[in-house]
Amino acid sequence: MNELMRRMLFLPEQGSAYAQQVDRLHYFVITMTMVGFAGVAATVLWFVIRYRRRAEGEPTPTVEPRPIHEVLFVGGPLALFLLWFAIGYPLFVRLQTPPRDAMDVYVMGKKWMWKFAYPGGPNDMDDLHVPAGRPVRLLITSRDVIHSFYLPAFRLKQDALPGRYTETWFQADKPGRYEIFCAEYCGLGHSAMLGTLVVMEPEKFDAWMTEARRSPVVAAAQDTPDAAASPIATLAQQGRTLAVEYGCVKCHSVDGTRHIGPSWLDLYLRKEPLEGGGTVVADEGYLTESMMDPRAKVVKGFDPVMPTFQGRIPGPEVAAIVEFIKTLRTDAVHPAPTPGRAYEPVPGFDPTRSR
Amino acid sequence: MSPSPASIPPAPADAGAPLYLERNYLNARRGPWSWLTTLDHKRIGVMYLVLTSAALFLGGLFAMLLRIELLTPGPTIMSALSYNRTFTLHGVVMIFLFMIPAIPGIFGNFFLPLMIGARDVAFPRLNLLSVYLYLAGAAIALYGMVHGGADTGWTFYTPYSTTTVTMVWPILLGAFVLGMGSIVTGLNFIVTIHTLRAPGIGFMRMPLFVWALYATSIIQVLATPVLGITLLLVAVENVFGFGIFDPARGGDPVLFQHMFWFYSHPAVYIMILPAMGAITEVLSAFARKNTFGYKAVAFSSLGIAFVGFFTWGHHLFTSGQSTVDAGIFGVLSMFVGIFTAIKIFNWTATLYRGSIAVRTPFIYVIAFLFFLLFGGMTGIALATVALDVHWQDTYFVVAHFHFIMVGGTIAGFLAALTYWWPKMFGKRYSERWGIVGATLIFLGFNFTFIPQFLLGNEGMPRRYYSYPERFWPLNVASTAGASVLALGFLVVLASLLLSLKYGKPAGPNPWGSRGYEWKTLSPPPEGNFLTQPTYPRMPHDYDDLNPGRGGH
């Protein structure tokens, strides 16, 4: 049944359990649409034949609806639409919440290619290698205009925005090769911005990964022209170098000591209270936002003194720094939020003015 | 008021009226100058008809070029840059020069005063200004097409539109000026409807086309300024380099999408609501039947206008918008669908116990119902969010909005045009060729866009210059359908133009319609009525056996 409907609707093959569930909703929706359409069409056809004009100028009776008619006209479709939504929205929520144990891959769109970077190295262009049967989280950004990462076989799409990370995830069922498209118009090479998702047996993937980390050929494809970054360094190692270079560590300690900004130790996924109320989970999105727009969400107890790195750090380097922050973990339980800054502000001195 | 030969009372009636009013609004004054400076709403409507029809054929020409290019997976007749420019022009011309101004500009101007028994709109000079704003906007956009031709798509998404090397600002400025014309028209209609209704036409006795125009005008006045602001901001960023939307300069690219769709989603209702109003009139006339659920149909127009403002986020489900926002916008989008469903059911029920004549305009009504039902249901499917993730930015979305805009709006436009043509020009077109044209358009349209739904299912993104070979067969089918569609439009154009010269005189009311606008002669005299008609009954009250029941 699934196979028949899928072929009738020209849907691509289903690469994941999620794709199958989306398709099931699709079949339900299209069937209900056809039934509704057939009902209306049959009624119209019946009326047109039954009440065809037999003489010019025939009088017709005035027919007015009773309230029950309009209630049915509203209630019937509303119930149906909300049912569709009740099935569709939880699926979307699932797509928006990657499992904790997912493997991360950084995706960067640029005119007109896809780059993929694994936290443990290596980088790769156009081909995204993932293992079958393991959840994979994609952290997506763009270096120039908006692109959209589209995997038709997984019923999955997420825009790639410059200066921001968006995320999505999938878990491939079985090994195979699947098309990657760019779905957001991005200029001359839009339709040539193709990639391939290569799903491998987990053992083969691990072997591939080990091999790729040693191979300078793949590593040469990486985007950082920085000579200091060794071609075989992992993202986190590059991040450590970059954090020094950009001066991040002048204000952020990496060992938990209090300083001008929040310490990076155990920062990842910590729930931080904010200046002006509310809390935020320090995930990839927040860490990136803090680099690009540091004053948007300031952690309670700190001053808005960080300058923006918008346009100063390219996408892959942001990824490297975030990866570095993610490695700074202890086993300690941290129920308390970050203690405040390490200095007392001088009265009348506004640190933001001096910049 | 005693009945006079000019006011056409119901039933046998028009015995004394001439078949063709020799001295009418078309020839009361002569010479090009009399047209360029006219304040007559009917002549302004006719000018809109000529201008927007020219835009329709220009946009259609671009569409055919696109379909020919997509006939093969690789390059066919043009380069990637030309292709990108062509689809931008197709979108800009169709939306800003045809869809938005056409039905209000032509039929709103021509028939709104006739339907409410007024001699003109409230501000005839503003009305003339709107034509000139249209011309100016079109000229600026045309200049932009010839010099540099933007390649951004009609959505002008940033930061692409602010960093592209092609010249974007003339088209933005053109759209801005066109928006001014749209606001002026909307304002004029609102004031006209409030102040110039003839005695006997209360708000709850207005023809339903007038209700639709009223709802449309409210959207035009409230939403179009946001488009103006957005386009100006893009132009400022593009020309002066301010960082508003470009992240490299500290801007926010998604902000543009929010502002753009805050206008452009309601704009979809600017395009479809007048068509819905026209369909309501045509349906009643050819079913010889009062509209089932007058109040429901009238208020659902206002409901669409209101809820339409709160659904823009459904264009951003994959833009990194928060999950909660996506859910809220999804549910709100379904409410717009409910209002449309009310209309579809009430139209269907209108046919019950009617006296249905299948003439050319009625074929467009059937086509409209089909397109709206399919376009609407696929819209609801998109609003389930999970399905949208697969369909967003693919040909499925292209097919969906073409079903609403081309299917819905153009079927409504053609139904209105073929229904009111005898009133506007006093001539009958060939019924046979009218039916041939309508059938060709209906079939051609389906052959063009049903394959595109399937292409979207298959995963073909929109705005693709080249494509993998597995998309080939459906693209060929779509192009073949587009050729039939184009042929249909040519047949309609030819049959209407020929009728001006060879058509039989129509008489004041060839369809036997009880719409208020038929209470005058064909073509109408310059002052609309020789004597003021009276309005003792609801519009489209055909219940002669029981005439008292028509009043609410």
Image (tube, coloured by chain):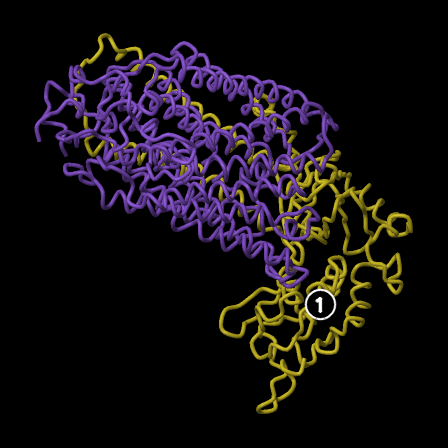
Chain colours: A yellow, B purple
Q: Quadrant of residue B526?
A: top left
Badge 1 density bin: few <14, some 14–19, many ≥20, Cα 10 Å: some
From the viewer's perspective, tell me whether residue B11 is left or right of residue A216. left
Q: Quadrant for the C terminus of chain B, please.
A: top left
Percent position (x, y) of residue B237?
Answer: 62, 58
Q: Camera-side residue: B492 or A275?
A: B492
**Disc 1 residue type?**
Arg
The number of numbered discs placed on residues in the rendered structure image is 1
Q: Is residue A250 above or below residue B167?
A: below
Q: Do we see residue B38 in this rendering?
A: yes
Q: Is residue B102 above or below residue A261?
A: above
Percent position (x, y) of residue B488?
Answer: 50, 17
Residue under label 1 = A329
Q: Quadrant of residue B548?
A: top left
Q: Residue at 60%, 57% (x, y): give it.
A: B245
Q: Quadrant for the N terminus of chain B, please.
A: top left
Q: Camera-side residue: B349 or B28?
A: B28
Q: Is residue B185 above or below residue B239?
A: above
Q: Quadrant of residue B197?
A: top left
Q: Camera-side residue: A294 or B203?
A: B203
Q: Is residue A211 above or below residue B513?
A: below
Q: Residue at 8%, 28% (x, y): give it.
A: B2
